[in-house]
Amino acid sequence: MKRYLDKQRSVAQDVKNGVRSAFRGVLNLVKSKPKIQLVQVSGLADETLQDVEMMQQFGFTSRPPKDTECIVVPLGGNTSHGIVIATENGSFRVKNLKDGEVAVYDKSGSSIILKQGRLIDVDCDTFRLNCKKYEVTATEGATINANTTNNGNLDISGVSTAKDHVSNGVSGEKHNHKSPETGALTSEPVK
C-alpha cells in the first residue's frame, strides 16, 4: 500500500510541476482595437508571449504604457493560453494616498483622487464636460477663481452682491442716461 501511495504522490507531483503558476511579466505592446485588448508580454527566461488577453473590470479600461508590469495567469497551466489579470506602473501611479483613498490617473499626470473627507480632487490641463443638461447644487456656495466666458443666454435669479458690474464696457454703478424729455444726461444711479 505504501508503494501505491508513493507512486500516486509522485504522479501528482509530476502533474503539479507541469502546471505553470501565475507569473510576472512586462508589457511590450498593447493592441486596443479588439473586443478584449491583446498584449505582448516579456515573461521569464526571455520568453515573449504574443496576443495575451488583458482582462479588465467592466466599466473601466486603460491602455497601459510600454514597460508596465503585469501578472499573467496561464489558464490550465498552459503558458500559451495565459491572461493578464493585473497591471502596475509605479512610474506614473499616484503616490502617498491616505488609507481608503482612490485615484484614477494617466501617463501625462492627469488624476482624479477620491480623498478622505468626501473631497474629489481633479488635476488636469483642460476639463471638458459634454452633456444635455448640467446641474450643480452647492448648498454652501460655489467659488470660481477664473475669468469666464458664457456663449449662451444667462438667466439669473436672486440678488447680486457685487459692488459693480460692467456690461459692454458700461459700469452698472457709474453711468448716465439721456432724459427722454430733454435729451440731457441724467445723474448717476442713486445708491
Image: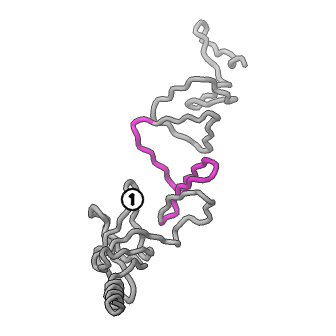
Q: Nearer the viewer, residue 53 or 146?
A: 53
Task: Residue 189: say if magenta.
Answer: no
Instruction: Tell me: 64 left or right of 126.
Output: left
Residue drawn at point x = 36 percent, y = 74 percent: 73
Q: Residue furthest top?
A: 181
Residue drawn at point x = 50 percent, y = 58 percent: 104
Q: Residues within 10 Å of mark 1 (few under 14, many from 20)?
A: few
Picture coordinates of residue 188, whole percent (x, y): 69, 19
Instruction: Tell me: 141 left or right of 85.
Output: right
Per the rendered image, the range of residues in magenta is 107-133
Specify the quadrant of the image occupied by residue 143: top right
- Magenta: main secondary structure equals loop
Q: Amino acid at mark 1?
A: Gln
Picture coordinates of residue 11, whole percent (x, y): 31, 88
Residue drawn at point x = 63 percent, y = 24 percent: 159
Mark 1 secondary-structure assignment = loop
Residue 47 visible to the viewer: no
Picture coordinates of residue 153, whole percent (x, y): 47, 29
The quadrant the N terminus occupies is bottom left
Relative to 174, say whether 141 is above or below.
Answer: below
Residue 108 visible to the viewer: yes
Specify the quadrant of the image occupied by residue 173: top right
